[in-house]
Amino acid sequence: MAARKPRKRDPEARRGLILDAARELIAEVGTERASHRAIAKRAGVPLGSTTQYFPTRGDLVAAALARTTDDWRRELASWQAALEESEAIPATLAALLCEYLANQDLTRIETELYLAASRDPALLPLAHQWLDGLAAVLAPWADAESAAAVAAFIDGATLQAVVTGIRPSAEFLELAITRLLP
């Protein structure tokens, strides 16, 4: 029998695998039901691996949600670039929002982060990364109050799409954004 080659240990890859599995589960079942055991099973790793990297379920959920904010930063950077090229800000923003809402996993995780942050103040800075980041992206085209109103509208539209499973039309989004921007 030939000797097996030892597997190369890659702690960062395993940590990433665990976080990806956690994000998938959070999108499917929420933060409250994303347990170490379920995440380990999804990731295909021993249960001890999840607790090695993340001693508590709260640590694991927080790290998975923090990883989501990395996605948001990239998303907001792409929104900013698209808006800078646009001649019709409300229409462009509506189209960007439609694309965002099509990613149900990301929108569910956003909603889960908001709910978790309402219960755990340590998660508030993560939630504010999206809220403040969106208002900052809108700043060149709106005063602070209007940017905050559009950000609140986008959050509300996202929440409704997550809850109902129905995404608003680009026309509806554009009309609402047009009315909120000066």
Image (cartoon, helix red, strand yellow):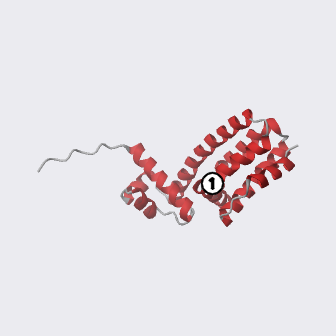
Q: From the viewer's perspective, is residue 46 above or below residue 132?
A: below
Q: Nearer the viewer, residue 44 or 157?
A: 157
Q: x, y (%) of residue 167?
A: 69, 59
Side of 168 relative to 75 (left or right): right
- Image quadrant holding the C terminus, namely top right
Residue at image point 75% right, 58% down: 156
Left or right: 130 in relation to 38: right
Residue at 66 percent of width and 54 percent of height? 101
Amino acid found under the numbered disc labelled 1: Ala
**Residue at image location 58% in from the left, 49% down from the top:** 68
Judging depth in this view, the residue of 165 and 29 nearest the camera is 165
Q: Quadrant of residue 49?
A: bottom left
In percent of width and height, residue 127 lies at 67, 51
Residue farthest left in this picture:
1
Q: Callout 1: 10 Å neighbours few (<14), some, many (20+)?
A: few
> Seen from this angle, which residue lies furthest right?
182
User: Is 46 placed above or below 67 here?
Assistant: below
Q: Which residue is mark 1?
A: 102
Residue 67 % position (x, y) = 55, 47
